[in-house]
Amino acid sequence: MACLLHADNITKTFPGVKALDSVNIKINSGEVLGLLGENGAGKSTLLNIVSGIYKAEQGKIYLGDKEVVIDGPKHALDLGIAIVHQELKLMPNMTVAENIFMGRLPKTKIGKVSYRKLFANTKELLERFGFAINPKEEVRFLSIASQQMVEIAKALSINAKLILMDEPTSSLTTEETSQLFDIMKTLKKNDVGIVFISHKLEEIFVCCDRVQVLRDGKDMGVSDVSDTDEYKLVKLMVGREISQRFPKRHSEQGEKVLEVKNLSRGVHVKDVSFDLHKGEVFGIAGLVGSGRSELVRLIIGADKKDSGEILVNGKNMDIKHPHQAIANGIFLVPEDRKLQGLVVMQTIEKNIALPMIKRIKKAFGFIDPRKEQKMAEKEIKDLSIKCTSQNQQVVSLSGGNQQKVVLGKCLETEPDIMILDDPTRGIDVGTKAEIYEMINEFTEKGKAVVLISSELPEVISMSDRVGVMFEGEMKAIISREELSQENVINYAIGGK
């Protein structure tokens, strides 16, 4: 295989942290290189340097045998380097077609955009790779999974020779992930090189040829996928052994704390009922679009229900706003942490204090800065949030540490019921283990958790019972004794 690109001794520093420390990377044509590491290890930073978004303070980049200085993302595209970002970089009020061909829109002879040609080109591209997306649809109306496919289509549209994929499967269903892997196989046959970042180790063994591990900005080495295993990779990533992927819980179930009766909203949630007990983790599984997130949004009053009842500790509650849910001991950690869970341009301290504003006010409505600081320091310590201080902006944290900030917000409200919507999406194995331990500690105190997860091993291993959603309905509630991937999948696709 010919070498497409290699970068030597890449070093990058941000305020208070050395993101990359003399890292080397080599990508060959027709191969997939898996790039692993905990959140904050430097993976995204390395891809951002190769794609021209960041400039390294030290190091050289070669395309083939020729040294290049990549002067911005457009220059990288001109060189045949495309990136699929972990955090979606789409214009929500523009169409799928406009997003895919942004900066390369076809023009008429008089210089106007030829929408006829644009939509035709987009349709041909999407159909060629099997994406069932309407080119004329505005991106804001698409699901997160479909938006991710648009990002991938953007990279494919330039006929790149090197594609950098940063967590491309984090929002995709099993079927969509399999479709992406088929696309990657086709690209390999056409001598395209791919760098593939994923926190799902099983994916690395399915689609990668070689794997490289970063830890704390340092290169921990490269190996052929056939010469390694999950145990070795995890140890390289976190610098320690994680003996149990899903730690055992020792909580006893008590009385009901939540009852959902015949909850409905349009076509999204249809006559759903379930209950939740003290000390229990109730899992909710189902394909993307099955109504999982819509269900829990009704419970906390983020959306208005058409019908149904919600009982908390036996008392019928008419929850019309998330503030009411928090006041009644229910907190939702949302699926989209950046859009719904955080004010990313604010500090860790401000974010953690946000749900607690009324409790930390002094006279005349002023916030007590000492209480604000104390709360942030406590959660930083308890959740091991990696940061320079509580005054660091959330936007500069890694994805895993951003998620810990959202969890810190939740825990500061001292909830009795914690609803977690895909809490480990885009999170590394070390941070996942910490979140699982936090869930166990929470339920061992006699509190309860509703856990939505797109990862079947996670929802099965962490839950006492699992409710499976299909097209807005709760198709089944499966007991611990009957829990298996086969059972969950059967109901998730509408089986009986």
Image (tube, grey):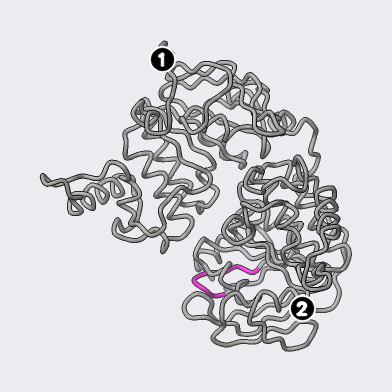
Most extreme residue toward the front is 364
Amino acid under label 2?
A: Asn
Determine whether 126 is above or below 287 in the image: above
As drawn, is 5 to the left or to the right of 41? left
Is 472 magenta? The answer is yes
Q: Label 2 to label 1, Cα distance in Å?
A: 61 Å
Tag 2 residue: 328
Q: Which residues are magenta?
A: 467-473
Amino acid under label 1?
A: Gly
Give neighbour class at mark 1: few <14, some 14-19, many 20+ (Cα, 10 Å).
Answer: some
Is the Cβ of the residue at disc 2 closer than 8 Å to that at disc 1? no
As drawn, is 205 to the left or to the right of 282? left
Residue 334 vs residue 367, the one in the foreground: 367
> What residue is at 75 percent from the left and 54 percent from the top?
349
| x and y percentages locating residue 474 in the rendered image | 58, 74
Determine which of the numbered discs, if any, sits on residue 64 in the image.
1
Most extreme residue toward the top is 65
Q: Earlier in the sequence, mark 2 or mark 1?
A: 1
Determine whether 305 is above or below 391 in the image: below
